[in-house]
Amino acid sequence: MVYLAFFMFSCGTSNKGSQQQAPNIIFILTDDQGWTHTSHRADPNIPESQSDFYETPNMDLMVERGILFTQGYAPNPICSPTRNSLMLGQNAARHIYNKDYDWYKKTADWLTIPKAIKMANPDYRTAHFGKWHIAMVPKDAGFDVDDGMPSNGGGEIFGDGYLDAKQYTKPSKNYLEQNNIPNPTNARSAGKPSAYWSDENPKDIFGITRKAQDFMTKSMEEGKPFYVQLSHFATHLSLVSQKETYEYFRDKQAGERHTNPEFAAMLKDLDTGIGMILDFVKEQGIEDNTYIFLMGDNGGRTTLNQIAVIGEDKALIEARYSTQHDRNIPLKDGKHSFYEGGLRVPFLAMGPGVQAARVVDTPVTGLDLLPTFAELAGHSGPFPESIDGGSLVNLIQDETVDKVERNSESLYFHQASHRKPRSAIRKGDYKLIKYWIEEPRYEHSPKVELYNLQNDLGETTDLSKQLPDLTKDLESELVGFLSRVEAETGERDIEGAYYRLLDDLGLRNNDDE
């Protein structure tokens, strides 16, 4: 086994000016927010890429003030592997889905976003707030300030405690049956309902935001540039919002594609938190020296299943079936899937040198953020070969640039090990998806599929039989990459590295499931 190692990389004098002029960097990561889950078009040329019900005025404002990337990709269609990949700038095949299942015990000297920034300029203060779900301790990753290692459970806040939606599975089922609640779209009953409740600080949106504001204030008082990452729990289930926000969407005419008022309210509250950051930057007079990036961690869920509305006393108020399905149209499928609905996400950037209202069609990925932030902080020179992303700095600051230099022309996506082994490769307009084992939900698997995304964004027509040579070449390239990095391509009975790390540290509890 050749373990991934951290290699020192060259850091020259910042080409952005002196250290005192080093830009601030804010990164906002949303959870389970689909490509179409905004009130602006994710692609100006595609009307269906804009929600007909959700409202995200502050994300829309970011589009007006900065760059809209129409082809932004999460590194993975699931949250934890994406978050590990973002932090390390590496494809998940190199770590969380690697044959070395103890990789997480060896990451003390691996390159991370805060380490790369500090190597470029040691004056930077770095912080992370919100959902962690990464197989590293935040301080070992290089953060000066953090608020712990919560996973999904950290967002299931109910008053001063935690609410487990699984406890409402049987009560909501009984309520639906006893009250003969209609199921007009034949929605499948999930193992647990999509629980909704109201909260003044839903999903800790405003708590995370206030922590970030306090950190930025202290950094400015010390005269230090800062990097702060806000990793929101929203819009991951359960569905939580302020009461008044929910009542607004409850009374609003539902759209044809998006209908659910509980999700819409949670998304709007998340957007309000983003607006607080935009306002803070403006009020502090640091707009001309602050970059703000936003992306989703994976595609949106395709359905919200049955809804269980919970009262202030934790009692079930009512239950009903969601009519919200295929929430990512015109993209196919959603979270967990290697189709575009699982991988393509909102991706926005604004800051000094960024032209307002610019649309960029070049494919970009969350793996690009580590080298981007490092270069903004002052790094110059090459990155280690194990860094799979490329810097976006030239792309965002120069309108004539339409390419990102990476260690590969192609984008690779992969999962295996404790998940069903699937992979994908995006090269030019073509995308190949490989299913390594038989999966009942997919006909004739194992198999490969080939799509032309330029002509068929919805991935409706498999071209693998029509273009056998291209299919063979892309599959060979994909398998070659996975072989070189010693990726696992089978299944094994093992938990994800994040949970094994919690066990090693003696920190695991029910909230972390």
Image (cartoon, rainbow, N blue to C red):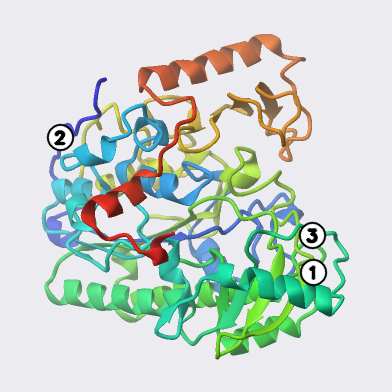
Distance of label 1 from label 2 (alpha carbons): 52 Å
On the picture, is 463 further left or further right than 180?
A: left
Camera-nearest residue between 166 and 381: 166
Sort mark 1 into few (<14), some (14-19) or many (20+) by Cα contacts within 10 Å: few
Q: Give the residue type that dot 3 points to.
A: Ala
**In the picture shown, does residue 186 fall above or below 480?**
below
Q: Residue at x 64, y 38 (%)?
A: 339
Quadrant for residue 352, please give it.
bottom left
Q: Which residue is mark 1?
A: 255
Where is residue 505? Give x, y as percent.
Answer: 22, 55
Q: Which residue is mark 3?
A: 187
Can you tell which mark lies on residue 49?
none
Distance of label 3 from label 1 (alpha carbons): 18 Å
Q: Residue at x 42, y 49 (%)?
A: 80
Quadrant for residue 11, please give it.
top left
Disc on the earlier residue, 1 or 2: 2
Secondary element under disc 2, as helix, strand or loop, is loop
Can you tell which mark lies on residue 10?
2
Disc on the earlier residue, 3 or 2: 2
